Image: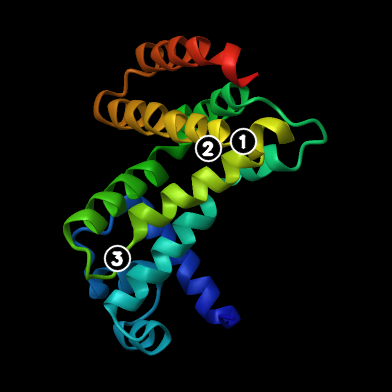
Amino acid sequence: MPSAGQSELLEAAYRYALAHGLADLSLRPLAEAIGSSTRVLMFLFGSKDGLVRALLERARVHEPAVLAQLRQEDNPVGLATAAERVWTWLAAGEHCPLLRLWAEACTRSLVEPEGPWAGFAEVTVEDWLNLLAACPPEPQRDAEAGSVRRTAAMPVLRGVLLDLLATDDEPRVTAAVHHQLALRRSDDD
């Protein structure tokens, strides 16, 4: 468990990463921006790679927050309804920095599979599939067809998310999400 000081610096570094990304992360400007030193960051996180891994883990905790809320509802919702709620959260402008960080980290994990990004793309797919699995009623959740539907919902959300990040055309992209989910609703709800 991280110390209070480490947690505080990690949160400050996370806010910095949301604003500046991780691709060209340099410890000296980061340390200066968050009121620390490179020496302290190296002591707390072991290396720049250790800090990047900690920041990616922090992003994984932040990203699926809306899905965790769906999981706590008394009445399970169908997959299409859950996906619509997820999209509403994703499309909200205030989440754009997190989603840009997610896209950057997923891409880096695919092209640099041995670096601090290792496995990030795969583990976030697992995170989302596991959380989406908790949304539908039990018969849909446990059936193999439910797994297939959850897997099919993922590229709809992630694909349009990349489109949204590239174009900032939320109305067009949201209309496409609703269109795709309407096609699936009869099977999912």
Q: Residue at x 32, y 29 (%)?
A: 159
Residue 167 seen in the figure: yes
Q: Nearer the viewer, mark 1 or mark 3?
A: 1
Disc 3: which residue: 118
Circle 2 SS class: helix
Label 3 SS: loop
**Where 25 falls versus 7 (above or below)?**
above
Q: Are marks 2 and 1 in contact (CB under 8 Å)?
A: yes
From the viewer's side, name the closer residue of 38 and 83. 83
Query: Where is residue 76 shown, x and y percent of the image?
Result: 74, 31
Q: Give me the residue at 37% from left, 34% from top.
A: 158
Along the line of sight, which residue is nearer the eye, 8 or 92?
A: 92
The answer to whether 172 is drawn above or below residue 125 in the figure is above
The disc placed on residue 143 is 1
Label 3 crowd bin: few (<14), some (14–19), many (20+), radius 10 Å: some
Q: Secondary structure at mark 1?
A: loop
**Location of mark 2 (residue):** 147
The answer for how far apart the CA atoms under marks 1 and 3 are is 31 Å
Please identify the quarter of the rendering in which residue 118 is found. bottom left
State which tag comes first along the sequence, 2 or 3. 3
Mark 2: amino acid: Ser
For marks 1 and 3, the one nearer the N-term is: 3
Q: Mark 2 or 3, which is nearer the eye? A: 2
Question: Which quadrant is the C terminus positioned in?
Answer: top right
Q: Position of residue 35 (x, y in %)?
A: 40, 74
For the residue pair 79 and 111, the one nearer the viewer reads as 79
In-front residue for pair 9/86: 86
The Cα–Cα distance between marks 2 and 3, rounded to whole angstroms, is 25 Å
Q: Residue at x 24, y 75 (%)?
A: 28
Instruction: Name the amino acid, label 3.
Output: Ala
